[in-house]
């Protein structure tokens, strides 16, 4: 069934297909959820509590697919054990000019330069508050990924993150600090250790008891990954997510010559190598959530065997379809 649906969706421009899908789900998330639960069947419970949050299983939805949390109630129906919405920023913003999302089907990959298009952290907070008030909370943990608004200069970045975290406190089971998207000019400079040393304590203080994770780029040198992991430990962060998309183009058969972050199958070797670096630097002091090119049970098993506490998926879902999370969980 999925190959047929996918071939129809792939006739559309990538972002249009995405908007159509999220829009349809957002209009009736619980109805779609019941339909998919019936189609996919039950998914075994494999609970763990790696970063202070009780995950239903270690396969999660990566940030960026549901930036504004519009389909938050739906994702558990696919078997995800935890769901990350966002990236949201303190100011609502339109993102980069379109087209900004490109499929590379022969490479099972995507290139995106969305640029944090989102309705802002206040809109996400309002949406989550409404769900909470209506007693309609997703049945797996929900994290909020936070980025910096484009109009905020890097020297004011900490306040931008703190604003979003303060709005969302009590409405997310964890926060992920995103300093690793390649599509906001200068954002990845926030991964510099002197900058992180100021940013991390500010966010941690704003988050209070809510666990905070730090998400890193695969394009960082090994030393910089080690330094970021050390700082995350030092400032009481609960975990590190490795990795975001890459600006490199290694291993592509079909390079469309588009700027942006590459995800999916060609990212996997680089992500895996950088995850290994993060795990070594962490040395058991802080858990690592692995992401990058996971599209088969063997990939998820590999990252967990390497030492990751959990795994996140985005691009694999686009190519393999909605049955992927359940397939990954069942194979663990
Ligand atoms: C279209 C697209 C948009 C993304 N947006 C975000 C985002 O807003 N915030 C973020 O932290 N990561 C974002 N990511 C990165 C993913 O969360 C993930 O880290 C990365 O794609 C690697 O996993 P994958 O190969 O399974 O896609 C995005 C990825 C894609 C493909």
Image (cartoon, rainbow, N blue to C red):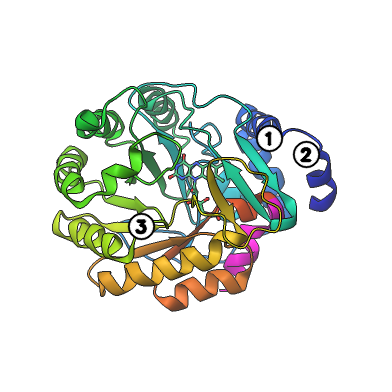
Q: Measuring from the top left, give residue 15's x and y in whole percent.
A: 65, 33
Q: Is residue 195 visible?
A: yes
Residue count near mark 2 (Cα–Cα under 10 Å), binned few <14, some 14–19, many ≥20: some
Q: Is residue 115 left or right of residue 104?
A: left
Q: Which residue is mark 2?
A: 9
Q: Measuring from the top left, give residue 73's x and y in whole percent.
A: 53, 39
Could you say which disc has been placed on residue 220 in the image? 3
Q: Which residue is mark 1?
A: 21
Earlier-in-chain disc, 2 versus 3: 2
Residue at image position (67%, 36%) is 31
Q: CA distance from mark 2 to mark 3?
A: 34 Å
Q: Measuring from the top left, give residue 141's x and y in whole percent.
A: 41, 49
Kindly report the secondary structure that dominates the magenta region of the rendered protein: helix
Residue count near mark 1 (Cα–Cα under 10 Å), binned few <14, some 14–19, many ≥20: few
Earlier-in-chain disc, 1 versus 3: 1
Residue at image position (65%, 30%) is 19
**SS at mark 1?**
helix
């Amino acid at each position: 069934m999925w190959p047929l649906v996918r071939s129809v969706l792939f006739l559309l421009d990538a972002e249009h297909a995405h908007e159509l899908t999220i829009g349809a789900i957002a209009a009736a998330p619980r109805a779609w959820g019941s339909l998919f639960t019936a189609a996919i069947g039950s998914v075994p419970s494999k609970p763990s509590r790696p970063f202070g949050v009780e995950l239903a299983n270690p396969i999660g939805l990566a940030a960026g697919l549901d930036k504004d949390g519009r389909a938050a109630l739906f994702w558990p129906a696919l078997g995800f054990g935890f769901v990350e919405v966002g990236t949201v920023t303190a100011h609502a913003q339109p993102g980069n000019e379109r087209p900004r999302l490109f499929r590379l089907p022969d490479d099972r990959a995507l290139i995106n330069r969305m640029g944090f298009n989102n309705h802002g952290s206040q809109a996400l907070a309002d949406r989550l508050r409404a769900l909470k008030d209506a007693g309609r909370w997703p049945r797996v943990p929900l994290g909020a990924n936070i980025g910096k608004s484009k109009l905020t200069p890097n020297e004011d970045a900490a306040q931008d993150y703190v604003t979003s975290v303060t709005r969302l406190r009590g409405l997310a089971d964890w926060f992920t600090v995103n300093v690793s998207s390649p599509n906001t000019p200068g954002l990845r400079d926030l991964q510099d250790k002197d900058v992180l040393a100021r940013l991390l304590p500010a966010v941690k203080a704003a988050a209070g008891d809510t666990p905070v994770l730090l998400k890193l780029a695969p394009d960082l040198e090994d030393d910089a990954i080690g330094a970021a992991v050390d700082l995350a430990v030092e400032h009481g962060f609960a975990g590190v997510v490795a990795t975001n998309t890459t600006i490199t183009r290694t291993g592509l058969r079909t390079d469309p010559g588009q700027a942006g972050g590459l995800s999916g199958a060609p990212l996997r070797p680089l992500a895996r190598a950088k995850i290994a670096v993060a795990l070594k630097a962490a040395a058991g002091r802080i858990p690592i959530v692995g992401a990058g090119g996971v599209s088969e049970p063997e990939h998820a098993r590999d990252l967990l065997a390497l030492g990751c506490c959990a795994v996140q998926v985005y691009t694999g879902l686009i190519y393999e379809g909605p049955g992927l999370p359940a397939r990954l969980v069942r194979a663990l």
